[in-house]
Image (cartoon, rainbow, N blue to C red):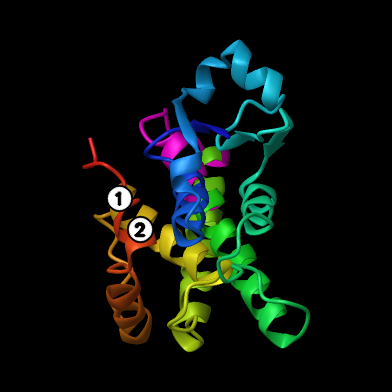
C-alpha cells in the first residue's frame, strides 16, 4: 500500500496510528506529499488533493481518514479499531466525528494564520475556535476510554495537533480529566510513534 503523507497532518497521523495499532505500518510505503501543490500522482488517487490518500494493493485510491482507517481495519487479524454494532460502536464513531471536527477547525485556523485581518475572516476564525472549545468541554465531561479504538485514536490526534500548532492556547486549563486521559494515551506506541515533528 502507498500513503500520500505529510508528517504535520493530524489526519495522516490518525491513519498511521491505526496502521501501527493493527500491525500494518510495515506494509505502507509513505509518499511525502505537499497537497497544496496538487501533484499529479496525488490527484490521480484523490481528486480533492488532500492527504491522507491511500492506494491499496489492488490499486484503488481511497481518501478521507475515516474511510482509510476503516479499510485498514478490514485487513489482518488484530483487534478491530471499529467496534461491532452496538453502543460501543456509536460511542467510538461519535468520538471520531467530534475529533475530526476539532482537527478540521484547527487546520482551518492554521491555514488562515498570517493573512490580512478582515471582519468576515475574523468571524470565521472565532467560530472555529469556539467550536473547538465546546468540543473540548464535552470531552472533559466524557473522555474516551483507556483502550485504543477509532474514537480514542482520533481524539488523541486532535489534542496532539492543538499542542503542535496552538501551544499558545493551552487547552488543558480547566480540563483535568481530559488532560489526564491524554497524558496516559499519548504514551501508547501508536500515538507516541506518530507524534508530529517539532513545530516550525
Asked if residue 90 lies left or right of residue 125, the reply is right
Position of residue 149 relative to residue 162, above or below, is below
Task: Please tell me whether mark 2 sits on a helix, a strand or a loop.
Answer: helix
Q: Give the distance between the C-alpha atoms of the residues marked 2 and 1, in whole angstroms.
A: 6 Å
Where does the magenta region start and end? 105-120
Which mark is drawn over residue 160? 2
- The reply to whether the C-beta atoms of the residues labelled 2 and 1 are less than 8 Å apart is yes
At which x and y percent is residue 51?
55, 34
Q: Residues within 10 Å of mark 2 (few under 14, many from 20)?
A: many
Q: In the rendered image, which residue does mark 1 sit on?
A: 164
Task: Judge whether residue 109 is colored magenta.
Answer: yes
Q: Residue furthest top?
A: 40
Residue at the location (61% across, 15% down)?
41
Q: Is residue 192 shown to the viewer in this render?
A: yes
Task: Judge whether residue 107 is colored magenta.
Answer: yes
Asked if residue 88 lies left or right of residue 178, the reply is right
Residue at the location (56% across, 38% down)?
52
Most foreground residue, 165 or 188: 188
Residue at the location (71% across, 78% down)?
90
Position of residue 12 relative to residue 96, above or below, is above
At which x and y percent is residue 194?
35, 51
Quadrant position of residue 187: bottom left
Most foreground residue, 144 or 105: 144
Amino acid at each position: 500500500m502507498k500513503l500520500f503523507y505529510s508528517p504535520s497532518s493530524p489526519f495522516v497521523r490518525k491513519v498511521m496510528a491505526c496502521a501501527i495499532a493493527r500491525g500494518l505500518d510495515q506494509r505502507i510505503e509513505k509518499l511525502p506529499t505537499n497537497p497544496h501543490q496538487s501533484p499529479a500522482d496525488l490527484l490521480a488517487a484523490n481528486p480533492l488533493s488532500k492527504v491522507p490518500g491511500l492506494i491499496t494493493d489492488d490499486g484503488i485510491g481511497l481518501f478521507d481518514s475515516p474511510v482509510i482507517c476503516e479499510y485498514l481495519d478490514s485487513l489482518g487479524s488484530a483487534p478491530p479499531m471499529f467496534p461491532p454494532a452496538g453502543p460501543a460502536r456509536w460511542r467510538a464513531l461519535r468520538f471520531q466525528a467530534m475529533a475530526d471536527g476539532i482537527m478540521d477547525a484547527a487546520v482551518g485556523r492554521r491555514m488562515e494564520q498570517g493573512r490580512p485581518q478582515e471582519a468576515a475572516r475574523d468571524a470565521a476564525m472565532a467560530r472555529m475556535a469556539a467550536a473547538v472549545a465546546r468540543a473540548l468541554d464535552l470531552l472533559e465531561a466524557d473522555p474516551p476510554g483507556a483502550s485504543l479504538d477509532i474514537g480514542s485514536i482520533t481524539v488523541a490526534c486532535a489534542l496532539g495537533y492543538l499542542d503542535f500548532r496552538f501551544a499558545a492556547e493551552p487547552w488543558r486549563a480547566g480540563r483535568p480529566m481530559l488532560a489526564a486521559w491524554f497524558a496516559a494515551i499519548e504514551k501508547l506506541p501508536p500515538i507516541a510513534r506518530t507524534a508530529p515533528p517539532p513545530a516550525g
